Image (cartoon, rainbow, N blue to C red):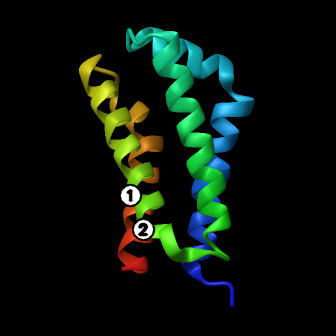
């Protein structure tokens, strides 16, 4: 049965994959603005895309769902910190904050 949690899992995963695959140029600019290295950027990208794929597969294999969603939430908190560190305008915080809230919703629904 397809539930609201499944829908949110798909929204989170597609959002992350879209940004990290189709908006790569924006990611490169952001990480330069955050003064983070290419290796950190690439590592974060690999982790986020892998977690997104796992988030989708956890619809059918939910054993590690809370750990996957919590990991994504942690990465979104790191993004929030980096936006704060470079004093970005509040509008820049919205995407990672939204994904953080959605990830916490998934975690709370899977406990």
Q: Position of residue 28 (x, y in %)?
A: 58, 15
Q: Residue at x 43, y 78 (%)?
A: 110
Q: Quadrant of residue 96?
A: top left
What residue do we see at 61% from left, 69% from top? 58
Q: Which residue is mark 2?
A: 66
The C terminus, quarter of image: bottom left
| Cα distance in 3D space between marks 1 and 2 | 6 Å
**SS of the residue under disc 2:** helix
Residue at image point 68% right, 84% down: 2
Q: Position of residue 72 (x, y in %)?
A: 45, 50
Q: Position of residue 94 (x, y in %)?
A: 42, 42
Residue pointed to by mark 1: 70
Q: Which residue is found at the position 33% from the left and 26% from the top?
A: 83
Comparing 77 with 57, the one in front is 57
Tell me, for residue 4, which label it has, or none.
Answer: none
| Element under disc 1 | helix
Residue 106 picture location, percent across and down: 45, 70
Q: Residues within 10 Å of mark 2 (few under 14, many from 20)?
A: many
Residue 19 higher or lower than 30, as above or below:
below
**65 above or below 68?**
below
Foreground pick, 55 / 27 = 55
How many residues crowd around disc 1 within 10 Å: few (fewer than 14), some, or many (20 or more)?
some
- For the residues labelled 1 and 2, say whether their Cβ atoms are less than 8 Å apart: yes
Answer with left or right where residue 63 lies relative to residue 7: left
């Amino acid at each position: 049965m397809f539930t609201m949690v499944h829908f949110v899992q798909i929204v989170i995963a597609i959002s992350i994959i879209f940004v990290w695959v189709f908006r790569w140029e924006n990611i490169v600019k952001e990480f330069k603005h955050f003064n983070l290295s290419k290796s950190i950027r690439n590592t974060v990208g690999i982790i986020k895309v892998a977690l997104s794929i796992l988030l989708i597969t956890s619809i059918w294999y939910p054993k590690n769902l809370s750990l996957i969603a919590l990991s994504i939430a942690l990465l979104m908190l790191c993004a929030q910190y980096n936006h704060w560190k470079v004093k970005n305008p509040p509008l820049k915080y919205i995407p990672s904050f939204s994904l953080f809230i959605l990830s916490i919703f998934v975690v709370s629904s899977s406990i």
